[in-house]
Image (cartoon, grey):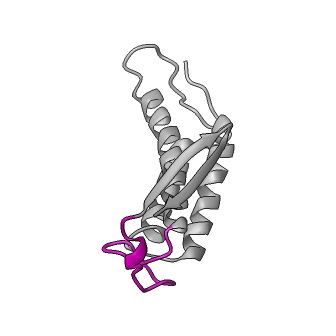
């Protein structure tokens, strides 16, 4: 039996993937990263309106792909908040709005954790 959902998660997955490539790729800036973070958060908030249409109990690739999409949204948020926290260009991560390197903070680490449902992030030197 197939079920329908208000939002097609395959379309959202393609949209987030394309936008991630365009706004969080090699060349990025704060505005694009923040815009993409809003799109990722939109998808996370509306995840309950998406879902697999295949409800079979065996060999359900549709369910696996939906779970992978849900997990990828969590990772996307972590990556985007990390990119926004690190205010420098380094290697392949080129911030068009911040073109200099920060050698003092080079050895720093991005620390991510959750408190309740909130993602917390800090940059520790």
**Residue occupying the far top of the picture:** 57
- Say which quadrant the N terminus sits in: top right
Instruction: Give whichever of 56, 88 is nearer the camera.
Output: 88
Q: Say above or below: 113 vs 99.
A: above
Instruction: Establish if 90 lies above or below 75.
Output: below
Say which quarter of the image contains residue 51.
top right
Residue 54 visible in the displayed image:
yes
Instruction: Give x and y (percent) for residue 93.
Output: 38, 72
Nearer to me, 30 or 122: 122
Q: Is residue 73 left or right of residue 49?
A: left
The quadrant holding residue 92 is: bottom left
Who's the residue at 68% across and 37% down the image?
A: 116
The picture quadrant where one finds residue 113 is top right
- Find out whether residue 103 is within the magenta segment: yes
Q: Residue, x 45% and y 77% (percent of image)?
A: 88
The answer to if 41 sits in the magenta stretch is no
Q: Count every numbered label the image shows and give the total.
A: 0
Answer whether residue 11 is visible to the viewer in this image.
no
| Residue 25 in the image, given as x and y percentages of width and height | 40, 69
Up the image or down, 55 lies above or below 26; here it is above
Residue 66: where, in percent of width, then height? Answer: 49, 35
Q: Going 55% across and 50% down the picture, which residue do you hit?
A: 12
| Residue range corresponding to the magenta coloring | 86-107
- The answer to whether 89 appears left or right of 51 in the picture is left
- What secondary structure predominates along the stretch shown in magenta? loop
């Amino acid at each position: 039996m197939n079920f329908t959902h208000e939002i097609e998660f395959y379309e959202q997955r393609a949209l987030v993937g394309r936008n991630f490539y365009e706004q969080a790729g090699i060349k990025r800036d704060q505005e694009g990263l923040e815009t993409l973070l809003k799109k990722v958060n939109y998808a996370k908030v509306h995840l309950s309106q998406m879902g697999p249409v295949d409800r079979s109990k065996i060999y359900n690739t549709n369910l696996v792909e939906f779970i992978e999409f849900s997990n990828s949204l969590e990772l996307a948020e972590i990556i985007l908040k990390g990119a926004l926290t690190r205010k420098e260009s380094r290697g392949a991560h080129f911030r068009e709005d911040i073109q200099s390197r920060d050698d003092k903070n080079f050895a720093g680490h991005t620390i991510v954790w959750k408190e309740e449902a909130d993602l917390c992030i800090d940059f520790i030197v």
